[in-house]
Image: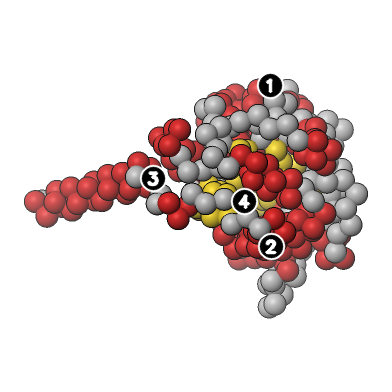
């Protein structure tokens, strides 16, 4: 019993040390030169974009990577002493959280305004979408008939009983989708959907989007709700043809088309390198950077009418939902409440 107690004390001390080191102690001056990015995106996904920007602008970029919530908390704790110039992350929900905490500075840029459609940038010019991804159905072609594939709301139907794979409700991708559904279908329709949808799960939600796709291959379920980025990347790297029997469906019905989300960024209000941060954002919406997003990261360009590779063209979104992502904030808390009421854990 004493050994167990001691182990718990050690774990508690280590946890306190981690938070003290990561959230309180500022980074050394090696991170203070030119442009400092706090990134919730993996370094490998940003490497080509950063290298190209550094060569063009002769600006050194320092990247500090961690989970989005950790970075947001870190910026809050550091306050005006933060080294961060820019927060780079995925999903509109995280950008809205950072804005709500008043972490971003207003950016007035004609290049950003011209190249980013209105629905993918903040109405107050504090955050900006940089690339797109869609929340889609990936299904097993031998176990799902294509005529049964419709819009999101159809996943409440009895024919999907014990067939659907999805990650947990605490994931922001699902929260943003449900918030968008409330905007499109209304609160009561979405409430009913969630109650029935939860009963159609093949197993208790667990893992990430890749795990749902792997579950289709292993026979745990017949249809998975995932982001395009994960499926397209797995398909591109599928040397053993494990995904041969899977395909993707872009949900659409008479009320809601395919839900589109973003990766995006905002400049920190205490930025010491504001002009460099603006240059970086403007570079990320250039044709060159947008093609890197598509060809390296398997995301969709934020810009309209940009030609994609033949591989990416196979996964073109037929009909994007035209919901302005600013409206996700209107229903995010409602979405969380309804998901909890339905028992989606």
Label 1 Cα neighbours within 10 Å, binned few <14 / some 14-19 / many ≥20: few
Above or below — where is 329 with respect to 258? above
Residue 286 location, x and y as percent? 79, 51
**CA distance separating discs 4 and 1:** 24 Å
- Name the residue tied to disc 2: 55
Please tell me which residue is depicted at 73% across the width and 68% down the height of the picture. 236
- Name the residue tied to disc 3: 26
> Upstream in the sequence, badge 3 or badge 4?
3
**Picture quadrant where residue 159 is located:** top right
Residue mark closest to the camera, 1 vs 3 = 3
Q: Which element type, helix, strand or loop, lies under badge 2?
A: helix
Residue situated in front as seen by the camera: 106 or 295? 106
- Name the residue tied to disc 4: 165
In the rendered image, is residue 177 in sight?
no
Q: Which element type, helix, strand or loop, lies under badge 3?
A: loop
> Upstream in the sequence, badge 4 or badge 1?
4
């Amino acid at each position: 019993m004493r050994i167990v107690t001691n182990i718990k004390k050690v774990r508690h001390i280590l946890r306190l040390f981690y938070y003290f080191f990561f959230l309180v102690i500022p980074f050394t001056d090696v991170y203070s030169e030119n442009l400092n990015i706090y990134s919730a995106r993996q370094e490998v996904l940003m490497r080509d974009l950063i290298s190209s920007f550094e060569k063009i602008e002769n600006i050194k970029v320092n990247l500090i990577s961690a989970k989005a919530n950790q970075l947001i908390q870190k910026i809050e704790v550091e306050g005006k002493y933060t080294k961060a110039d820019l927060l780079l992350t995925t999903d509109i929900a995280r950008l809205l959280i950072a804005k709500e905490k008043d972490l971003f500075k207003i950016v007035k840029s004609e290049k950003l305004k011209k190249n980013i459609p209105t629905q993918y940038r903040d109405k107050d010019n504090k955050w900006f979408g940089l690339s797109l991804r869609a929340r889609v159905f990936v299904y097993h072609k031998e176990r799902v008939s294509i005529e049964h594939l419709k819009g999101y709301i159809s996943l409440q139907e009895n024919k999907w009983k014990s067939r659907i794979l999805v990650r947990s409700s605490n994931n922001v991708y699902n929260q943003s989708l449900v918030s968008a559904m409330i905007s499109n279908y209304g609160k009561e329709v979405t409430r009913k959907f969630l109650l029935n949808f939860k009963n159609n799960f093949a197993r208790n939600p667990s893992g990430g989007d890749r795990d749902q796709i792997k579950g289709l291959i292993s026979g745990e379920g017949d249809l998975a709700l995932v982001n395009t980025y994960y499926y397209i990347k797995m398909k591109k790297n599928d040397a053993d043809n494990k995904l041969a029997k899977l395909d993707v469906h872009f949900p659409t019905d008479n009320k809601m088309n395919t839900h589109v989300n973003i990766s995006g960024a905002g400049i920190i209000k205490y930025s010491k390198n504001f002009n460099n941060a603006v240059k970086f954002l403007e570079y990320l919406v250039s044709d060159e950077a947008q093609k890197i997003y598509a060809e390296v990261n398997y995301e969709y360009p934020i810009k309209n009418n940009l030609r994609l590779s033949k591989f990416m063209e196979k996964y073109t979104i037929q009909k994007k939902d035209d919901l302005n992502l600013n409206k996700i904030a209107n229903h995010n808390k409602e979405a969380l409440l309804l998901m909890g009421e339905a028992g989606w854990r």
